[in-house]
């Protein structure tokens, strides 16, 4: 097989945005190629139950992503296991290089490379990820109804997550390593007024502990940043809320970005600052970061790409 493949639409990324774009672009007879990247299926493959994707009362994240892949394939999307290492947007067709040595040329490109939650990097944090440790209150807060929860962080995300989690939790402890928050003042006011939230200043997460069988969190150990004193906080859920990083490295130098590297699109569309390049999902979205919103944007990107290609003919 040739080392260069041409396609009308190249989809980069295999999360909900990428696969949905694959379904729509295939049904528009655009014969798309989708390159999966290092994490086939995207972020949802790192979680367990998903209870908020319409049509599924409860589904395991990896199972949902296999269904999405099968759906895109069944519609005719070609799915390739490769990682795009560079994208040249200065020439038409656009030229993407794969880690495999393959070159992909494309009349339109849909970027759906997602985002990553930032983690602290503790071994125990990793052990309980998806089993009591989360980075998404919207996704997982519901699992902790009537229980004690801790939130780690001091920025807008942490305060928003803490406030949201009071809808479910009996108590939320916000652990922050300084004595003041970086969050906007209005959020800080809401936090201080909320009787369910206790803020623990000058502490950082030392360890998450819990049971091995079944795997589940029972609490955390936090360390005072100046005295080094260790303190124990019982909790069933630990939300690490220290920010997200969009996977925009491929195009951060050539496309307009905002809010810390998220790809900027014309509101109400998936059009980026370069005609013919579209962006969908968490890569463009610092606000909602959900599977269903990403899938919605994947649909929009395929429809936008189809209309763009029609104007080029
Ligand atoms: C632990 C966890 C639990 C979650 N739970 C829920 C939930 O219950 N409900 C919900 O709605 N949302 C949940 N989310 C959020 C949801 O997973 C994301 O909003 C969604 O996956 C974003 O989809 P996406 O398609 O934009 O990108 P992602 O899912 O982030 O996928 C990005 C894709 O891009 C690929 N990629 C990256 N770089 C390259 C490259 N250079 N070349 C080729 N491919 C590349 C990756 O391999 C990956 O396939 C959760 C997230 C996490 C981390």
Image (cartoon, rainbow, N blue to C red):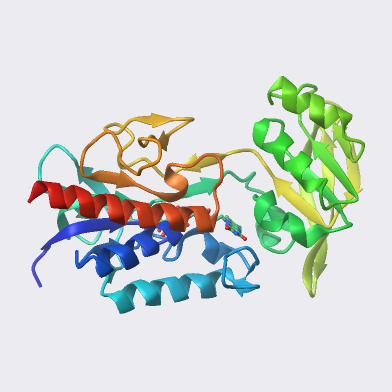
Give me the residue at 72% from left, 31% from top. 154
Q: Position of residue 170 (x, y in %)?
A: 91, 50
Give me the residue at 55% from left, 53% from top. 290
Give me the residue at 54% from left, 62% from top. 44
Q: Position of residue 65 (x, y in %)?
A: 48, 70
Q: Report if residue 158 is visible in the image.
A: yes
The answer to which of 292 and 123 lies nearer the viewer is 292
Give me the residue at 72% from left, 64% from top. 131
The answer to which of 240 and 106 lies nearer the viewer is 106
In this view, 26 is above or below 251? below
Q: Position of residue 301 (x, y in %)?
A: 33, 51
Q: Position of residue 230 (x, y in %)?
A: 88, 40
The answer to which of 278 and 62 lies nearer the viewer is 278
In this view, 68 is above or below 244? below
Query: Which image quadrant is residue 52 in?
Result: bottom right
On the rendered structure, is 94 left or right of 186?
left
On the rendered structure, is 213 left or right of 300?
right
């Amino acid at each position: 097989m040739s080392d260069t493949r041409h396609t009308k639409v190249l989809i980069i990324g295999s999360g909900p945005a990428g696969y949905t774009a694959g379904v729509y672009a295939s049904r528009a007879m655009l014969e798309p190629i989708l390159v999966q990247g290092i994490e086939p299926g995207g972020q949802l493959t790192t979680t367990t139950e998903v209870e908020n994707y319409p049509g599924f009362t409860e589904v395991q994240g990896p199972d949902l992503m296999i269904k999405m892949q099968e759906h895109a394939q069944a519609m005719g999307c070609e799915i390739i296991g490769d990682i795009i290492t560079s994208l040249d947007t200065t020439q038409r067709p656009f030229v993407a290089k794969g880690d495999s040595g393959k070159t992909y040329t494309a009349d339109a490109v849909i970027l759906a490379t997602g985002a990553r939650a930032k983690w602290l990097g503790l071994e125990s944090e990793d052990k309980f990820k998806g089993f009591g440790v989360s980075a998404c209150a919207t996704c997982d807060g519901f699992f902790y109804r009537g229980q004690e929860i801790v939130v780690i962080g001091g920025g807008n995300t942490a305060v928003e997550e803490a406030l949201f989690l009071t809808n479910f939790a009996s108590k939320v402890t916000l652990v922050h390593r300084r004595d003041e928050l970086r969050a906007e003042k209005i959020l800080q006011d809401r936090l201080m007024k909320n009787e369910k939230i206790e803020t623990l200043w000058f502490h950082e997460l030392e360890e998450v502990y819990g049971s091995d069988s079944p795997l589940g969190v029972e609490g955390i150990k936090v360390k005072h940043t100046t005295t080094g004193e260790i303190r124990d906080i019982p909790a069933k859920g630990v939300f690490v809320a220290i920010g997200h990083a969009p996977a925009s490295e491929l195009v951060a130098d050539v496309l307009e970005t905002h809010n810390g590297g998220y790809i900027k699109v014309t509101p109400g569309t998936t059009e980026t600052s370069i005609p013919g390049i579209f962006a969908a999902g968490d890569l463009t979205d610092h606000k909602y970061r959900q599977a269903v919103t990403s899938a919605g944007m994947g649909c929009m990107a395929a429809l936008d790409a189809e209309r763009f290609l029609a104007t080029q003919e």
